[in-house]
Image (tube, rainbow, N blue to C red):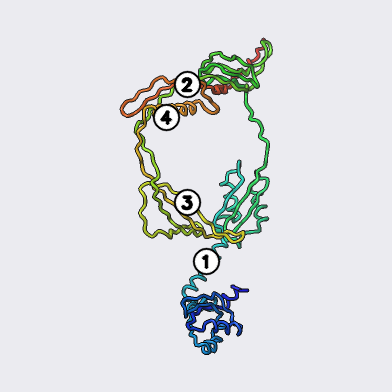
Amino acid sequence: MRNTWKEWIEGHITITVRGKRFERFLNMAVREGVHIWNIRRVQPDVSRCDIMIRDYFRLRPLLKETGCRCHVEQREGLPFWLIRLRRRSGFALGALVFLFGLYMLSTFVWSVEVLGTKQIPPERVSEAAEKIGIKEGAWKVKLKEPQELQRELSGMLPEASYVIVDIKGTKAMIQVVEKDEPKSPKATGPRNLVAKKRAVIHGILAEAGKPMVSVNQFVDKGQVLISGIIGNDTRQSAVSARGKVEGEVWYVSNISLPLSQVLYQFTGDKQQKQYLVLGPYAVQVWPLREEPFARFKAEDQRYQFTYDRFTLPVSWKTVTLSEIEPVKRQLSMDEAVEAGKRAARQDVLARAGENASIKDEKVLHVKAENGKVYVSMHFSVIEDIAVEQPIVVPPPAPAHHGN
């Protein structure tokens, strides 16, 4: 059974044997214990095979006896690689310097990533980490043990339940787990809920306070919907009114769209730029000369070199530029009207606010003029119309005492 590693370490050669008695030569070599493989016939009197370096000089008596001649075609293996390397000492020195530089770069932190923050700003975590030495360009040899870094960072961030510091290769990851503290309800003074727009009441749900309107009732802007004054004529108190009041509000949206539109589409032509990234620096390797597109969309992919669990400070980035070109499109009247309706709906919902819904819509007017289509639409929208209004409680009247 062949041992390819042993063959490469000891070195092997490919020889060409010329002669009519090649089979006789081959049988004699095998009997002498010569390791031969990859035997093939090239021409009627020419054959080729591979042997170990150490067996080459053992073939001389066999060649003489069979009348064959031998010529070395190819040399492979560690001994020949070392000879070529010695002839190119500058290249070998450069490779060693590169590997040493790569090793030195891998001993630094080149990126810091903060994870898990919701209430705590990531910038604050980064500033705290920088104070204890975790920053871009930090030498990992001088950093403290991860447990010590975690303890110091937790002390600087009282809002965090605990902090995990994990340094993998050239990347430092800081995982923050924030304390789950219950939020105390916001203290509010006495207030009413009033209408922020003219509307017809669609639904009302009072959680605190006294409802002052009913469903299908028309209300003006500023009218009290849920009162914060509760009680009877003899005994009253002021509370913070809470609840939800939905009303039907009316809008008119006017939209204009050009019949001739410019769209951008891909031409199919692409260019690629190759970058060698060393830490925070990127060096363009290819192409040496480029003819940039007038308009393009760029997408990049990065291939990070890793070894085992360690991330090396070297990566390869490929940026693909896809050319795009403007294309004019002429809309028909029906297409322009439909596009105007969609734009009008978006406009109305943006004006109505969150959780609003369109109950009814009607096209008021459509006209085409000067290359544009004008669409006017009326909408009935269901939305939350309640807004808070503080209740001003007058101070008690001063007491008068008679003489």
Residue closest to the eye, 275 or 49: 49
Q: Could you say where residue 235 lies in the image, as x and y percent from the top left?
A: 69, 13
Which amino acid is tagged 2?
Answer: Glu
Q: Which residue is mark 2?
A: 361
Are the residues flagged by discs 4 and 2 in contact, CB closer than 8 Å? no
Q: Could you say where residue 210 lies in the image, as x and y percent from the top left?
A: 64, 16
Which amino acid is tagged 3?
Answer: Asp
- Mark 1 vs mark 3: in front: 3
Which secondary structure lies at badge 2? strand
Of the image marks 3 and 4, the number of the one nearer the N terminus: 3
Q: Residues within 10 Å of mark 4 (few under 14, many from 20)?
A: some
Q: Residues within 10 Å of mark 1 (few under 14, many from 20)?
A: few
Distance of label 1 from label 3 (alpha carbons) = 26 Å
Instruction: Relative to 48, say whether 392 is above or below.
Output: above
Q: Residues within 10 Å of mark 2 (few under 14, many from 20)?
A: some
Q: Which residue is mark 1?
A: 101
Q: Which residue is mark 4?
A: 339
